[in-house]
Image (cartoon, rainbow, N blue to C red):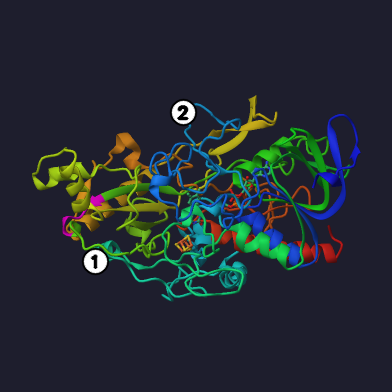
Amino acid sequence: MQNQFIKTLNMQIIENEKQYDVVIVGSGAGGGMATKILADAGLKVAVVEAGPFFDPANPDQQTQLKWPYESPRRGAGTTRAFGEFDMAYGGWEIDGEPYNQIGESKFDWFRSRMLGGRTNHWGRISLRFGPRDFKGKDRDGLGDNWPIGYEDIKPYYDKVDKLIGVFGSKENMYNEPDGYFLPAPKPRLHELYYKKGAEKSGVTVIPSRLSILTKRINNERGICFYCRQCSRSCSVYGDFSAGSCLIFPAQKSGGQVDLYVNSMVREVEVNEEGKAKGVLYINKEDRKEYRIRGKVVVLAASACSTARILLNSKSAQHPNGLGNSSDLVGKYLHDSTGTDRMAFVPELMNRKRYNEDGVGGMHLYSPWWLDNKKLDFPRGYHIEVWGGLGMPSYGTGFNPNDLNKYLGLKVGGYGNQLREDVKKFYGSVMGMSGRGESIARKENYCEIDPTTVDEFGIPVLRFNYKWSDYERKQARHMHNTFEEIIENMGGIVLGEKPGADRDYGLLNPGRIIHEVGTTRMGSDPKKSVVNEFEQLHDADNVFIVDAGPFVSQADKNPTWTILALSWRTSEFIIQELKKQNI
Ligand SMILES: Cc1cc2nc3c(=O)[nH]c(=O)nc-3n(C[C@H](O)[C@H](O)[C@H](O)COP(=O)(O)OP(=O)(O)OC[C@H]3O[C@@H](n4cnc5c(N)ncnc54)[C@H](O)[C@@H]3O)c2cc1C
Ligand code: SF4
């Protein structure tokens, strides 16, 4: 794109001569969907992305189908948080891009720097929010209701299902709405054990809902061939990634999409009326600062990065940061609750060997099944299940030798003894993860740290986040449930049950990587940052299509809702541009 930059305005900022209809910051779920819808409508779109170009089909970037022996540590992580072959270019810590905490706060912030963002290596759990999820306050008086309801977003969930593809099953459950599903894969043996144990305790178990193609939906994408490696990103585009399923198709269908990769946006610039006129970014290759202009700016840098950009966009018109007249940018940050437990199932020892790889994720799960009136915490959680005969590799978290203690046998050993133990216990350990809804609170927030800048000279974020007893009690309930299910399966619970001293095992906020809420949606500009079309109250040509606008996070994973809202907002932008309202 370098040749478009012809005019140097001053020593610092290099100006792009091209004027775009829309400048989109970030190319993950939200940015990818906006790119597709806006470019398909004929608009000239610039996508400004902090990470490099990435295509899962590029053999130079591919890690799918590599063997453990092709990694120096046999698949265990060196620099990557989820193992050497995981496709995240990033992680909890990124060199040169620090973040800080206030006081005792321990917020862990996962970022991926690459075209497609975190959708290149996410879990592909693709759940719709249900009608109750938009109106939590009506049920228990906590948090706030969304200004929209399920009926507003349903048509967009439907379109997302059809465009991207998701497998699942029709269940007719009120708060787990059915969609347009591809056939779900059959459960594997450890999942059948889970089902048996869970149903004995009255826990609902249904086929999972993942955005993986079990049937062909178009000629651009292949069908899943069950290699179980979605976290490595799929070279045949069998699973959903924003690059392969949204941005590349937008380019192929003639869309006017210019990609500016390795470009870290510092701020949104505004004109005298306080409306956006484009963005300033640092090119990470030459370290120079560039300006790019657009009629509309769409922020999709992920909930906390977008808050950071807005707070760093101070001007005479917006002295508190862009969109921050309410002082709410960064506030109400919340992540899903989460805790995990592992089990050893003796009946699964010495299993017959066969390929049961399946998709890169669970084939069954449990949506929230209880009534809070009978519980000591608000909102709910779902249970994810994992285990089976996966590819053996290092870094999987347990020592097979150790399991002998549950059988009254000698622990330890090497050579033939170790080999026998590995074979004996292979496939007999499984686990459960609870992922639940926390309450959005103003006291949990991110803000600009006045003392620290990143390697590009951009002020960084600091976090202030504490769990409340609502979340702790939910985690306690998760462990009680896991233990009951494991007992019902004839399994042995591994590890000690975490007590109050360890917040009942509740993982640090941020760990579930569902951070949302930093630019909340609402109809009152004093109590929210964007309106129901994710449009800034303070600047009508700026939109936010990541998870920042979420008022609450539900007991579901957020990405299907990010995608549906981004589509809805993009249609609104097209209409408003046609009407010359923005
Ligand atoms: C291991 C893992 C598993 C997950 N599993 C699931 C799951 O099963 N289901 C689910 O719903 N969700 C899951 N998630 C969460 C999911 O990945 C996110 O909800 C989703 O990707 C968020 O989309 P986004 O567009 O807001 O942000 P991202 O996907 O993070 O994309 C943001 C993009 O913006 C870029 N960017 C950031 N700052 C700037 C800047 N200043 N200038 C330019 N570009 C910038 C980033 O480089 C990135 O490419 C998972 C996440 C992880 C990491
Ligand atoms: S499990 Fe299927 S969708 Fe996932 S990477 Fe393998 S082939 Fe692709």
Write the start and end of the magenta stretch as one range: 343-347
Foreground label between 1 and 2 = 1
Amino acid carrying label 1: it is: Lys
Q: How crowded is mark 1: few (under 14 residues within 10 Å), some or many (20 or more)?
A: some
Q: Residue 429 in the image: state x and y as whole percent.
A: 25, 52
Q: What element carries label 2?
A: loop
Q: Where is residue 431 in the image (x, y as percent from the top left)?
A: 30, 52
Do the residues bearing badges 1 and 2 touch, measured as CB atoms within 8 Å? Answer: no
Task: Say left or right for 322 vs 234.
Answer: right
Q: What element carries label 1?
A: helix
Q: Observer-nearest residue: 561 or 56? A: 56
Return the mark for residue 214.
none
Whole-percent x, y for residue 62 in the image: 53, 52
Q: Which residue is drawn at 54% across and 60% down?
A: 235
Q: Is residue 490 above or below residue 283?
A: below
Label 2 crowd bin: few (<14), some (14–19), many (20+), radius 10 Å: few
Q: Can residue 275 be seen in this view?
A: no
The residue that label 1 is drawn on is 196
Using residue 558 as the reference point, say whether residue 312 is left or right of it: right
In the rendered image, the quadrant that contains the C terminus is bottom right
The numbered mark at residue 104 is 2
Q: Residue at x 66, y 29 (%)?
A: 455
Magenta span includes 344:
yes
